[in-house]
Amino acid sequence: AYLNPSYKFYCIEPSFENFKILKKNFDSNLIKNNIKIYNAAISNKSGSETFIEGNSSTTGFLKSSNIFFDNNLQKEFVIKSFSFQDFLKKNNIDDIDILKVDIEGGEYLAFENNLDLLLRAKLIIFELHMCNNIIPEKTKLFKYINNNFKTSYYYPSKSYGNKLIEIFGKKKHD
């Protein structure tokens, strides 16, 4: 954000602990007019969702995502949520240079019913998780990304085996 003030950054973080870190980084940035931060979640609906804070800063997830984590739960709380479509509309976003999605199983809630919204992104970085006992490579989202983006990915994950794919893609057609 500092190196190129013409870029716009939208940072969405549902975890209160991780949001504190995001806010601290935001507050220390000299240029703030191109950054927007939200203590919220992206889901399939706008309103609210139950968020489960895991035993580390990397294992929080939406209760409705049915993610595979076998977690020692610490906290469960209600958080503001946006559908991806509503978030784009709220912020007048038509085109996305880079879309990074790491929402611990919530990617299916957020995108599977609005797959065409992904075509607004030139580049994508996704983590796809096993949910509802379906491995990522068998999901509609994974197939859509592979059909519409030139992809490379890490699979199986060193830590989670076939329960996680890290996928990188460049849109095939403009």
Image: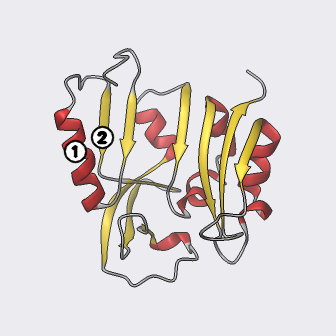
Pointer 2 local density, CA inside 10 Å: few below 14, some 14–19, many at least 20 = some
Q: Please tell me whether residue 168 is drawn above or below residue 157 in the rendered image.
A: above
Q: Which mark is residue 37?
A: 2
Nearer the observer: mark 1 or 2; the answer is 1
Residue placed under numbered mark 1 in the picture: 23
Q: Where is residue 35? Give x, y as percent.
A: 31, 30
Asked if residue 16 lies left or right of residue 55, the reply is: left
- Kindly identify the amino acid type of the residue bearing the numbered disc 2: Ile
Element type where label 1 sits in the image: helix
State yes or no: discs 1 and 2 in contact (Cβ < 8 Å): yes
Asked if residue 132 lies left or right of residue 72, the reply is: right
Q: Nearer the viewer, residue 84 or 126?
A: 126
Q: Quadrant of the N terminus?
A: top left
- First in sequence: mark 1 vs mark 2: 1
- Kindly identify the amino acid type of the residue bearing the numbered disc 1: Lys
Q: Where is residue 36? Give x, y as percent.
A: 31, 34
Element type where label 2 sits in the image: strand
Q: Quadrant of the C terminus?
A: top right
Q: Please tell me whether residue 168 is drawn above or below residue 2 in the rendered image.
A: below
